[in-house]
Image (cartoon, grey):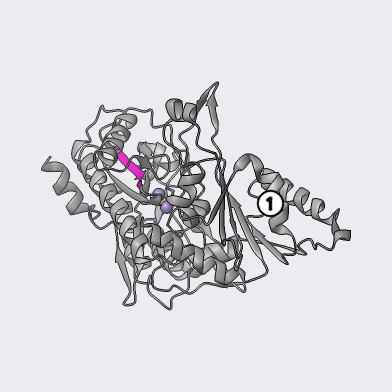
Amino acid sequence: MKHSEFKKRRKQLMQRIGHGNIALISSASTRTRNRDVSYPFRQDSDFYYLTGFNEPDAVAVFIPGREQGEYILFCHEFDEKKAIWEGAHAGLEGATGDYGADDAFPIDDLDDILPGMLENKSRVFYPMGRSSELDHSLLDWINHIKAHSRSGVMAPGELISLDHILHEMRLFKSPEEIKLMRRAAEVSACAHVRVMQKCKPGLYEYQIEAELVHHFMQNGLRYTAYPSIVAGGKNACVLHYTDNAHKLKSGDLLLIDAGAECDHYAADITRTFPISGRFSEPQKLLYQLVLDAQYAALEYVKPGQPWQAPHDAAVEVLTRGLIGLGLLKGRIKKLIKDEKYKAFYMHRTGHWLGMDVHDVGDYKINQEWRILEPCMVLTVEPGLYIPENCKQVDEQWRGIGIRIEDDVLVTAQGHEILTSGVPKTIIEIETLMQAS
Ligand code: GLY
Ligand code: MN
Ligand code: MN
């Protein structure tokens, strides 16, 4: 991502905060995995969105109209020893020289310097409740100013969540962001094709996971956007299955929900296919139903449609189909009203997608479902999950879990599927697998 993009975002943020006010946000911290080993560091998405700064223990401050500079970054000072053990870090010079901060201070001086920056500001925008350390520090700093009110300084009177302003910005993707999302989607789609070709009975789920990660990394994408779900047979009925530890059996389906991250932007793809390359009849019937539900939902992904419309379309197709196959009994209207489909379809049809896999942005405005607009990106991911112990359905359906998930950009004309590189019709999947 170009530095000019981060600068543009900061400018937009400053305009929304307004003169006389201040915003602050802290970076993610490193987390201990065990003893002196940390989990891989992943920057907080909001913090990265505004700064492009990829180190822990930093705080960014935005003060519109401040004469000495509007953007201040607190971070670690450059330390030779740290550089030898842990590698490059920006230091104060890098914060201003490379990352565009107008001013930079050591993070250890935060408590001394920040109260002065809060003095005489009316409103403080910050990610309320996300970091208890920042929450507490902010109240301490404000109390510190109040204790000196006789000298004429004023403490801020309003604390406002930064989320709303920032997440509205993040919801609408710029051309630069779409480029990164396209790359994440394309590489992830190729990885799904690759595992369809490599899959065979007897492999373990984690060996398929290894193929996915191999493809992501070989193509320059080091990280997955979320833990990959590689679920053979009935494991597919566990929605967030990540054990990935079982042997793949001939005759079962394999559900894979996996996506790479490209410079902090996620892809999120699910495909379900037969481990041995051919769907059985019951698998075919349920699979086609999920696919029809996805096509129906996609019809409603266009500007002017409410957020809920693709979900409603998917639910209607699924419920009608479940009646047709004998898995639900009754009248469609009543079954939908009573949410009977939830026995087999218990999640929603999608979510916003961006720097976070379940990305930020309001789904309702003034209690009404939000209207889709160009440059929003969402997933469309209907599914059916028939629990193994579901006695009220015929045995042939039990233990089958299917989901089909694509990443979709809303365009002025309608939509563009970013993940269309991976097949999803029965014939396409069987043809690809049998040619391998
Ligand atoms: N991978 C999580 C989801 O599909 O929402
Ligand atoms: Mn998803
Ligand atoms: Mn997914």
The reply to whether residue 344 is in sight is no
Q: Position of residue 16 (x, y in %)?
A: 57, 71
Q: Quadrant for residue 305, please give it.
A: bottom left
Queried whether the magenta region covers residue 260, the answer comes back as yes
Q: Which quadrant, please, contains the C terminus? A: top left
Q: Position of residue 366 (x, y in %)?
A: 62, 74
Q: Nearer the viewer, residue 258 or 261?
A: 261
The x, y position of residue 374, in whole percent, is 39, 73
- Please state if 271 lies on the left or on the right of 158 as rendered: left
Q: Nearer the viewer, residue 24 or 349?
A: 24
Vertical position of residue 20 compared to residue 358: above or below: below
Q: Which residue is painted at 64% across and 39% down in the image?
A: 108
Q: Which residue is mark 1?
A: 114
* The image quarter in which residue 150 lies: bottom right
Residue 69 shown in magenta: no
From this view, report whether residue 41 is shown above or below residue 176: above
Return the residue nearer the eye: 267 or 122.
122
The magenta stretch is: 251-261
Q: Secondary structure at mark 1?
A: helix
Where 296 falls versus 61 (above or below)? below
Whether residue 75 is visible, yes or no, is yes
Give neighbour class at mark 1: few <14, some 14-19, many 20+ (Cα, 10 Å): some
Which residue is situated farthest in the right direction here?
Answer: 150
Q: Nearer the viewer, residue 158 or 264?
A: 158
Which residue is drawn at the image coordinates 52% and 48% (left, top)?
A: 44
Quarter of the image where one finds residue 57: top right
Residue extending farthest front: 68
Task: Please state which amino acid type lies under the numbered disc 1.
Answer: Leu
On the picture, is 321 further left or further right than 126? left
